[in-house]
Amino acid sequence: MPTKYVVVLGTLMSGLGKGVATSSILRILDFYGFRVFPIKFDGYLNYDCGTMNPYRHGEVFVLDDKSEVDMDFGIYERFLNKDLTGDLSITGGKLFSIITTKERRGDYLGEDVQMIPHLTNEIIGKIERIAESKKPDVMVIEVGGTVGDIENSYFIEAMRQFSLKHKTVFVNLTYVPTIDAVGEQKTKPAQIGFRLLLQAGIVPNYILCRSPTKLLEKTKEKLSLFGNVGIDRIVDDSDQPTLYNLPLHLMEQGFDRMLIKDLGLREKPIDRVKLAVWKDKVAKIIKPRHSANIAIVGKYTTLKDSYASVKEALIHAGSAADTRINIKWVESSSLEKDDLSEEFNGISGMVVTGGFGLRGTEGMINAARYARESGMPYLGICLGMQLMTVEYARNVCGLKDANSSEFDPGSRHKVIDLIESQRGIKQKGGTMRLGSQRCIITDKESIAYKLYGKSSISERHRHRYEFNNSYRKLLQGKGLRISAVTPDRRLVEAIEWTTGFGIGMQAHPELKSRLEVPSPPFIGLVQEALKFKR
């Protein structure tokens, strides 16, 4: 059976949740046993997301194969419970790099190289090659940005041409605001979005309407009239109690049956066991028996998307523990003082996150000290593990100027330092220790072993600096447990306090957390937070 395609486009404004809508479509088709994969297009001219500012773009998501991709890939993986690959990420930078290379090589000799047909043909060919390689029943293609942007206009044109060759269903995600003063849902902005799509030569098969409240029937009627689609294809995508409820909400409206029919897929019974597991997990997010307040300490907390995977990993662990996670976002630069009791009043657990650069690092060190001395459950991720090391070196081992060479190259005690393979690197993109890396838990009495229940584990990495081996014996002699290392024993992967629950991991365990398979360190943190609260 040839691959079918769903193309998700957004009109009117960005940030509507195309990634969640795309993931929900993928999950619905997966419930029916169809083999599905996403493709994401991003119009920026960066080759990938690796060098982007988290304040502007949100977190950089890392795949097993070392690819640094858009954060929407995190949503896809969390919904599908499937590891994805970097070839599914298409950026403007990659496309123009291919075109320029071909032109210089002489592939277009004698031709004027243009957006149409050369660039659009490249896009179409790339999608066809991915489909040939993955052999899915359905590919769901998310077009980043907003219809009308210059950055994605050539890709949208390629999708129009693509639909002439392949069975393609178009889904338009738009916004229906409610004016508080009159309490009326307004359709005019969505109508403007429809016109932009029509001007691009695309007639949507479905219109998903983001709205703060449930879509009213009269609103659907109006959108159907002006959007030129049947009223049953105006689909409510109003705010949900959790984003993981959206697939269920769409199915309640019959979207699943209509989509399968439109794609011309053979009918299959839904996997009721898989659906029941999903419903149970969602129910424990919406109406849990317990609650816990957990602080996320980070450098970029003003944009919550900078730590999207950390937040979701806590929600997954909360669902597993039947616990509502109330997150307190703590900007690390606000913790550069002696007394932190007010900031962590009522908090039962702490995650200190990753990041780059000097700003806010002293606050993170203070946070680690507060957790260690108060007995508060602590999880340090990447930079959070490195600064946990610095804190221990300073305040337990007496190395008062201990630091990372990233922040203080002149420090006498660089307990965190560059490894030899990172020295002399000039380019930034894709040069860190990236992707899935295996590590060995060496101590069966450790927190790590109790969490994972095995000695060999694999987590994803994204970092350049490492624990300095010159200080291993000193820190271990003062009670710091090194509980995991690389298979060759050369690099430290996890450290722990021997008093209370305190673990730091050089990896980013949040990147592999899924609703159906939560990350072990996050489950451990939530469980310990419930004990600490009591």
Image (cartoon, rainbow, N blue to C red):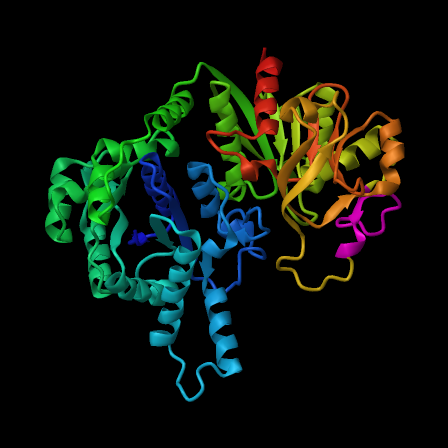
Magenta stretch, residue numbers: 403-422
Residue 528 position within the rendered picture, expressed as x and y whole percent measured from the top left: 61, 18
Horizontal side of 123 relative to 529 (left or right) equals left
Q: Is residue 151 above or below residue 318?
A: below
**As rendered, which of 395 and 71 lies closer to the eye?**
71
Specify whether residue 213 is in view: no
Q: Report the residue that reaches farthest toward the bottom.
A: 110
Horizontal side of 125 relative to 54 (left or right) equals left
Q: Is residue 482 above or below residue 73?
A: above
**As rendered, which of 180 and 531 lies closer to the eye?**
531
Horizontal side of 522 relative to 263 (left or right) equals right
Occupied quadrant, residue 34: top left
Residue 193 position within the rendered picture, expressed as x and y whole percent measured from the top left: 24, 56
Residue 391 position within the rendered picture, expressed as x and y whole percent measured from the top left: 77, 33
| Residue in view at x 43 percent, y 43 percent | 76
Residue 475 position within the rendered picture, expressed as x and y whole percent measured from the top left: 85, 32
